[in-house]
Amino acid sequence: QLVIPRGSFLMKIAMLLLTLGRPVSGFMAPTFLRNAARTLSASSGYDCLSPMPEPEKFDAIEALLIERSDARYARDYDRADDIRDQLKDEFSVAVYDRDNAWEIREDKGFRGGGGRGGRGRGGFDRPPVDFGPTGHDYVRNEKDTSDLSDERLDEINSLLAERLQAKLSRDFGTADAIQIKLQQELDVIVHDGYKEWRGDGTDFAFKTAYKRTGIDMDSPIDEEAVNQLIKQRAAARKNRDYTTADDIKAQIENEFNVHLNDAMRTWEVKVEGKVYGSANSQWKRGDEKGSDEADDFETTVQALVDEREKARAARDYDTADEIRDRLSDEFGVFLQNRERTWTVGPYVAKYKRDKFDRPSPDEDEDFASTVQAIVDERADAKANKDWDTADDLRDELNNDFNVYVDDRKMIWKIDNGPPPRRGGGRGRF
């Protein structure tokens, strides 16, 4: 496998070819150049400019970005537009093709990328970011139990901070050099997707498991053979052998009539050539059953939720919206697309303390419970759209307890240097 440094002449050619999505002067981009273009951040070739989402969500976004890049390369701009819209609708992701970057946006009115296939300019300005005492927002992987001295930890944190600032300045040559130094000299492995690092030299595991879903769960099919091919495809993608990965995907579809959903890590048997997605439902109830609820209430609501999901999978958004409104007006049910849960009444987010934010020796024993109570009160205020109260509680947490709440990860932590949100908004940080 040929590795091409970021910022090099060959990398610029690779990115140019990938962006244009067509042969230049009769020259078709070699596979290794297309693959090299995907090494900028993770496998998609796009940098994440916002705080990293949870690993499962990041993997889903990356899978869609890869699929979109392939569609643009094949000049299938309608498909690329659909994927761009899917990224915006399902994950609040804005794609900046000119800058080979993406970010999660809270403001709902942003553009998905601009132009056919997202080929617009879509530039942006980013403010300086303060990442707190360590100078970065990476955390040590919880499975890394190696014994590191304070001096070694300081050195690792210093290099991680320097590398992060280089990435934010788009100085990828310096960022790569620091990553090589971390790995070769300090035995540190960095995962930009998970925003984690390991100091024991162990690489991060690559997930291969997919779950069967869809509206047809009964058709006889050799599931073991399908899953084996999926594992082979995952290995090819891990090695950036996308030609083999695409061939295996086509084999799965042609031989087994199976559609792979890399975003949701699922596969399903197509029905009359159509894909319905997770229609028999990865959605579940997110609150406790009420004492005075009718016996068939939950079954009825779940059936409607499943019907709405089937409509969304078929891109019948008018029907999906009608079902959503009926759930709200007739049953008082609210849907949370990110969590894929439904609740009776407004959804109150459940926050907890960041597992990496360990109590200090001098922390009061009632500190955590006091903060948790305020965080829960703020979540309740946000659920009821009481933004003034939510803002007051946010200020109390910041000023009196030095606590930051991450609304994306639904955690709270002490003085961990959160980057400011550019979108602002009531009741937000």
Image: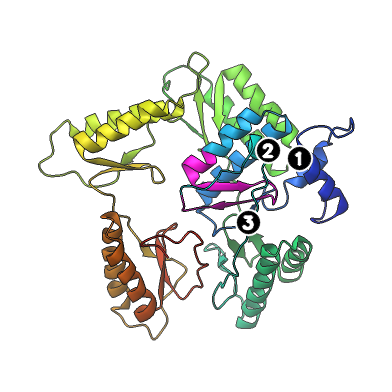
Q: Which amino acid, mark 3?
A: Phe
Q: Which residue is mark 2?
A: 69
**Which badge, 3 or 2, comes first in the chain's sequence?**
2
At mark 2, the secondary structure is helix
Q: Which residue is found at the position 71% from the left and 29% from the top?
A: 75
Q: Is residue 263 visible?
A: no
Residue 290 percent coordinates (x, y):
15, 44
N-terminal label among 3 and 1: 1
Which quadrant holds the N terminus?
A: top right
Judge whether 380 appears above or below 131 on screen. Answer: above
- Distance between mark 2 and mark 1 Cα atoms: 7 Å
At horizontal 54% and vertical 62% (from top left) the residue drawn is 143
Q: Is residue 90 magenta?
A: yes
Vertical position of residue 314 compared to residue 424: above or below: above
Question: In the image, is 193 to the left or to the right of 407?
Answer: right
x%, y% of residue 339?
Answer: 39, 46
Residue bearing the label numbered 3: 124
Number of numbered discs: 3
Magenta-colored stretch includes residue 102: yes
The location of residue 156, given as percent across then percent down, is 66, 74
- The residue wearing badge 1 is 18
Instruction: Please give the range of residues in magenta.
Output: 86-107
404, 265: nearer the viewer = 404
Q: Residue at x 64, y 68 (%)?
A: 199
**Label 3 neighbourhood size at 10 Å, few (<14), some (14-19), many (20+)?**
few
